[in-house]
Image: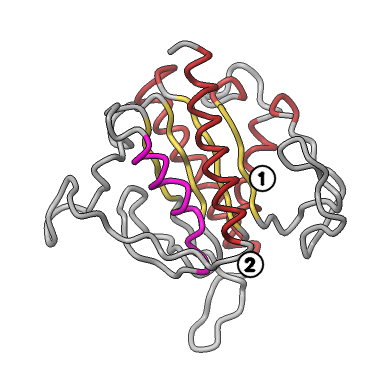
Amino acid sequence: IVGGRVRSLGTTVLTTAMLAAVSLASVPPLAAAAPSSGSSLPGDEPFVHPDNAALDCPDLLVVAVSGATDSTADRNPVEEEARRAWSNWVGNVTVPTGERFADEPGTVGWAYVPYPSTYGLGFFEAVPAYQDSVAVGVDAMNKILDDKKNQCGDATKFVLVGYSVGSEVTERVSRDIGHRDATATVTADDIAGVVLVADPYRPAGTPSLGEPGPSGGGFMSSEPADYGALA
């Protein structure tokens, strides 16, 4: 597709994310609810939002990693379901973006990355350590990207979205992609945008959307990351 079209779609996702982030600061978002119609019925195949073209080759695929406690390692990436309001921030980007292009079928799809999404603390059951959970998320996100690239070639570009713990997963994948050579399955040329919200490693004062960032950083604030060709 034409580069300008990709940039326009990517801008729409980034704008939606920005508005959702602003609302997050004042009003807790509602968990994304299953839509009234979709590609399957209860008891049949997983319920896919009617505006989600992820199973095909959309112009743009949003690959989203939710926050702690909101995902599982066996989560179906395209299934839409109600989840915890305080962790399902990514649902405030995926679903509205799909609905924005409801009259243009095949334009946008989205997939949720399955991973344990734990803090590493389990009070009633054993859970993976935090870094082990993140590592599973990194592998799962890369698999979604590689599988879709193998299926669709250059027809589909990607926007990577992460919230909270999911931001660390997204940051690691983005940094790696930014330093890959042209022989990799997915390279920087395939990425239309990256959105990190509530990133634990956000450096203090990092600019956001061209504006000065807050003086504080994430709770594990670090030096600015090197995103290579994605910078």
Residue corresponding to mark 1: 172
Front position in the image: 77 or 134:
77
Q: Residue at x 52, y 69 (%)?
A: 86
Q: Is residue 116 magenta?
A: no
Does 92 lie within the magenta span? Answer: yes
x then y, percent, for residue 75: 37, 58
Count of numbered tags: 2
The magenta segment: 86-100
Q: Residues within 10 Å of mark 2 (few under 14, many from 20)?
A: some
Quarter of the picture containing the N terminus is top left
Q: Is residue 140 above or below residue 34?
A: above
Query: In the image, what residue type sits under mark 1?
Result: Arg
| Left-right relation of 215 to 38 | right
Please give the name of the residue rendered at 27% of the width and 58% of the height, measured from the top-left corner: 34
Q: Disc 2 designates what residue?
A: 130
Quadrant of the rendered image containing residue 156 = top left
